[in-house]
Amino acid sequence: MAAALEGWGYQLQESVIQLQLEPAELDEVRRQVTEIINQANDVIHLYPLCDSCLTRSEIHGTSPALDDAGLYRAVW
């Protein structure tokens, strides 16, 4: 799953990948996740970051430099 999602964004931790997507790209990611996921054992969470939340977000420590507009966080 990580390999598929890394093509769309940045792996921040082993199980956290931050994605910057247009709406059509998000639809494609959803389609790919649905094809790959093991429904019995896996779970994927997609969290949209609205502009208000994004401007209040904080990053502590070392992290990749991101242009954060329109990000979704993919967590499993």
Image (tube, rainbow, N blue to C red):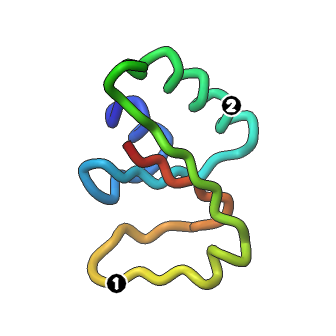
Q: Is residue 28 above or below residue 38?
A: below
Residue extending farthest to the front is 40
Which element type, helix, strand or loop, lies under badge 2?
helix
Crowding near the residue tagged with mark 2, few <14, some 14–19, many ≥20 C-alpha atoms within 10 Å:
few
List x then y, in percent, for residue 56: 60, 84
Rendering quarter of residue 42: top left
List x then y, in percent, for residue 45: 50, 44
Q: Amino acid at mark 1?
A: His
Instruction: Quickly name the residue at label 1.
Output: 60
Q: Residue at x 27, y 77 (%)?
A: 62
Dot 1 or dot 2: first in sequence order is 2
Total tally of numbered discs in the picture: 2
List x then y, in percent, for residue 22: 71, 45
Residue 27 is tagged as 2
In the rendered image, which quarter contains the N terminus? top left
Q: Is residue 34 above or below residue 47?
A: above
